[in-house]
Amino acid sequence: MFNVIYAKYHKHIFNFAMKLSRNYEIAEEATQDTFLVLHQKLDIIKIEYLPAYLFGTCRNVLYTKGRKDLRESGIMPHDVVSNEKLAERIVEEDYMDTKIEKFLSSITSIERTVFYLKNFEKLAYKEIAAILSLSVRTVARIVARLKLNFV
């Protein structure tokens, strides 16, 4: 079963990691780590919707690696941005994160995946449809419904 999942989603996860990292080696490592996590947890947890789980895991792997790389480089946020601007940005991000989390908790897992792929990955309807095995028309309807509900 794992081999089938790997064969079906490997390319999509790698492309997703490339869009986030813009680095071939990092994307390759994140893809491997994503499938390693899946392999370790496949028999342990119930995965409601596999594509959402894989994309979410890959995103988390990349963010964790990015934070670790920043710590190891010795660069601290206040070295990059003044404390005032950093605090302002954190408040704005917290507000948006809370708003997005509340919205995401109110929709189905397929809608969450479409929302994520459309708004954060900037994928076209056709690409989303291919990844999720949906029709382009269905993806368009989901996006339209999500736009109406995300206020």
Image (tube, rainbow, N blue to C red):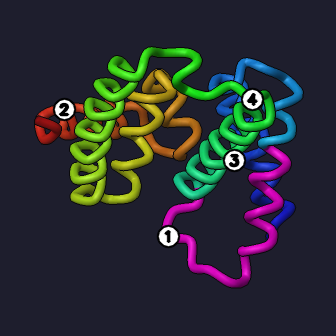
Instruction: Tell me which label, 1 or 4, sits earlier in the chain.
Output: 1
Amino acid type shown at disc 2: Lys
How far, Cα to Cα, is label 1 from label 4?
39 Å
Say if 44 sits above or below 85 in the image: below
Query: Mark 1 or mark 3, which is nearer the start of the sequence?
Result: 1
Determine the CA span between mark 2 and mark 3: 28 Å
Q: Which residue is mark 4?
A: 74
Q: Which residues are magenta?
A: 31-50
In the image, residue 4 lies at what x, y percent?
Answer: 80, 60
Q: Secondary structure at mark 2?
A: helix
Report, in whole angstroms, how far the alpha carbon at label 3 lies from the one at label 4: 20 Å
Per the rendering, the mark at residue 147 is 2
On the image, numbered disc 1 is attached to which residue?
A: 48
- Left or right: 140 as drawn, with respect to 37: left
Q: Quadrant of residue 10?
A: top right
Q: Which quadrant of the view contains residue 40?
A: bottom right
Residue mark closest to the camera, 1 vs 4: 4
Residue positioned 81% across, 52% down in the render: 33
Residue topped by disc 3: 61
Q: Position of residue 73 (x, y in %)?
A: 79, 28
Q: Earlier in the sequence, mark 2 or mark 3?
A: 3
For the N terminus, give its image quadrant: bottom right
